[in-house]
Image (spheres, coloured by chain):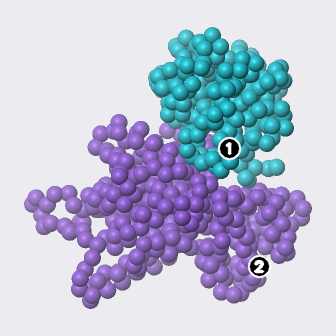
Chain colours: A purple, B cyan
């Protein structure tokens, strides 16, 4: 297309998914992601060989995803906070059955019903499992609407490449705000053939079987260890981050999503005051960009992690830093967004 | 003000209310948005109050809710002919449903319903889409649209060519729908920076009230 269009984050995810070949969407509305479901309904219901279902619950939706993914189709579901919690059993099943799919979480404030304002409190849930058992999601954290477009498309490729669920983790502000975006033609990506495992009718061949269990502990240990090896490969190959203004920085901010954008303005304004701050913005939250953080810590910089939570990603930063330098934290919760002034004030405390 | 989700109704309604306030003593803006959870008039209520504008929004804890909530004050103001009332209605036909509830209080001679159109938004990008949007909003509000506000923009990526091209399409739609264009709304950063010969309708310069947390203060 190439033409620019003004889109809400939620709409942009929907359009990008459809352009990536997603023809199946199952979900249940919840603020602040409902425009995504509305967009998919408007578009998919007019398309052939496509299905949209507003399910009776989030649990039903994630199990419909399991079904569609078993046929090899590109499929997506989305929700926020409480709805994502309801989907966790299904996400665990999808992970062990190695079914590719995309799950979108437009984070609102929690715990509990919380409220409908933006937050980043689902970081642990997204990156450390969330459901039961040993598994990992690939977690992508965009910070602009264009990046939502680009990463949604990439999420489907990564899901197919690794036969693994991919989560897009964005806060409510990114879901609701509008920016101009462009849908660029993407170079074709080589992806593994799905024919060897999908359930598409077994006439003339051996039946395939997709199950999320094995009663034999010896066999199931082997199975889960294979998953573990896949996660190591993902860690080696799929880390993405943005690092800016790192040369001679007096302090490094680590932030993702909306907070990273605020940090960028703070960095520009601080420069005018003669203060030099760097930014590491993780784009993949799993795999986490440990190496760049570890190598930066060698130069004994101070770190300041800013999140819209009580401090979740900061634990991964501390693991990567391994005590080599100080890691400070500033967070807002309850749906509050850290302001430019607050972040600059915190920066000055640690210079 | 009615229009598709994200067409610019709230910013235009706020600016238009302030413009009216310069000419009339009793002006109120009503936040009737039941569709959008963020970026609503209620967020800048205090700022508008200091400018002498009455702002009607859900009260108390309801101000933060995403529930259909109608202040009992609205009906009273509608019956008070001294008041100039600007209704900032939620997006699409779903947002306009609430107008049907007030239909009996709105006399046919005494209202204007302006359709805000941004031709760079997903569901109003061409003539058939704009026509469909107008039709659906009229159907659910049980009111007739009386004019169009042309609001062609790509947010921060807007330039003069974007405005000109978008406005041409909206102008064409207005002719097809047999509706007048009341004004073109343009961000005030373009004030005295665009050549006026491109536009034969009045230009209404907008001051943006909804700000993102990373914008320069």
Badge 2: chain ID: A
Find residue A221 and report its horizontal and vertical position in percent: 32, 86
Figure check: A230 above or below A278: below
Above or below, B81 against A261 in this view is above
Expressed as whole percent of the image width and height from the top left, the position of residue A264 reads 74, 59
Depicted A122 relative to depicted A33: above or below: below
On the picture, is A54 further left or further right than B155? left
Q: Is residue B56 visible?
A: yes
Q: Is residue A145 left or right of residue A82?
A: right
Q: What is the distance, in whole Å, between disc 2 and disc 1 at their CAs? A: 48 Å
Q: Tell me the element at label 2.
A: loop
Q: Which residue is mark 2?
A: A301
Q: Is residue B178 left or right of residue A274?
A: left
Q: Quick check: marks 2 and 1 in contact, CB under 8 Å?
A: no
Residue A116 appears left or right of A92: right
Query: Mark 1 = which residue?
Result: B59
* Residue positioned 60% across, 18% down in the render: B106
Q: Is residue B157 visible?
A: no
x%, y% of residue A289? Answer: 59, 73
């Amino acid at each position: 297309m190439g033409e620019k269009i003004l889109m809400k984050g939620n709409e942009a995810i929907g359009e990008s998914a459809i352009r990536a070949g997603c023809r199946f969407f199952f979900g249940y509305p919840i603020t602040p992601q409902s425009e995504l479901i509305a967009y998919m309904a408007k578009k998919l219901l007019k398309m052939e060989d496509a299905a949209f279902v507003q399910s009776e619950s989030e649990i039903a939706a994630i199990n419909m995803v399991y079904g569609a993914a078993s046929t090899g189709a590109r499929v997506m579901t989305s929700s926020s906070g409480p709805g994502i919690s309801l989907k966790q059993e299904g996400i665990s099943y999808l992970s062990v059955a190695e079914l590719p799919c995309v799950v979108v979480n437009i984070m609102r404030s929690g715990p509990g019903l919380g409220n409908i304002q933006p937050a980043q409190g689902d970081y642990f849930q997204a990156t450390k499992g969330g459901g039961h058992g040993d598994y990992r999601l690939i977690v992508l954290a965009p910070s602009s609407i264009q990046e939502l477009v680009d990463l949604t498309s990439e999420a489907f490729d990564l899901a197919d490449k690794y036969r693994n669920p991919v989560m897009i983790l964005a806060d409510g502000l990114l879901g609701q705000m509008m920016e101009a975006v462009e849908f660029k033609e993407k170079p074709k990506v080589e992806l593994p053939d799905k024919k060897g495992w999908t359930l598409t009718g077994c006439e003339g061949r051996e039946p395939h079987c997709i199950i999320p269990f094995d009663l034999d502990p010896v066999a199931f240990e082997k199975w889960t260890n294979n998953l573990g090896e896949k996660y190591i490969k993902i860690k080696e190959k799929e880390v993405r981050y943005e690092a800016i203004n790192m040369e001679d920085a007096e302090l490094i901010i680590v932030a993702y999503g909306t907070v990273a954008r605020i940090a960028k303005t703070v960095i520009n304004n601080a420069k005018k005051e003669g203060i030099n701050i760097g930014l590491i913005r993780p784009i993949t939250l799993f795999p986490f960009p440990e190496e760049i953080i570890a190598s930066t810590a060698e130069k004994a910089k101070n770190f300041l992690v800013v999140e819209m939570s009580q401090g979740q990603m900061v634990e991964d930063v501390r693991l990567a830093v391994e005590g080599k330098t100080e890691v400070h934290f500033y967070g807002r919760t309850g749906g509050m967004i850290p302001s430019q002034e607050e972040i600059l004030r915190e920066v000055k405390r640690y210079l | 003000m009615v229009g598709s989700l994200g067409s610019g109704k709230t910013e235009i309604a706020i600016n238009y209310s302030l413009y009216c306030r310069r000419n009339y003593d009793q002006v109120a803006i009503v936040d009737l948005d039941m569709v959008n959870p963020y970026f609503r008039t209620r967020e800048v209520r205090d700022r508008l109050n200091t400018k002498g504008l009455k702002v009607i929004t859900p009260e108390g804890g309801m101000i933060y809710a995403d529930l259909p909530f109608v202040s009992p004050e609205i009906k009273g103001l509608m019956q008070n002919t001294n008041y100039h009332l600007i209704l900032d209605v939620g997006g699409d036909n779903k947002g306009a449903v609430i107008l049907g509830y007030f239909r009996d209080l709105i006399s046919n001679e005494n209202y204007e319903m302006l359709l805000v159109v941004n031709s760079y938004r997903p569901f109003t990008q061409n003539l058939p889409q704009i026509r469909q949007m107008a039709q659906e909003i009229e159907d659910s509000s049980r009111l007739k649209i009386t004019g169009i506000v042309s609001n062609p923009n790509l947010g921060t990526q807007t330039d003069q060519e974007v405005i000109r091209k978008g406005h041409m399409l909206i102008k064409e739609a207005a002719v097809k729908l047999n509706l007048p264009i009341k004004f073109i709304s343009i961000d005030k950063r373009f004030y005295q920076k665009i050549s006026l010969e491109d536009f034969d309708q009045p230009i209404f310069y907008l001051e943006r009230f909804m700000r993102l947390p990373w914008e320069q203060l």
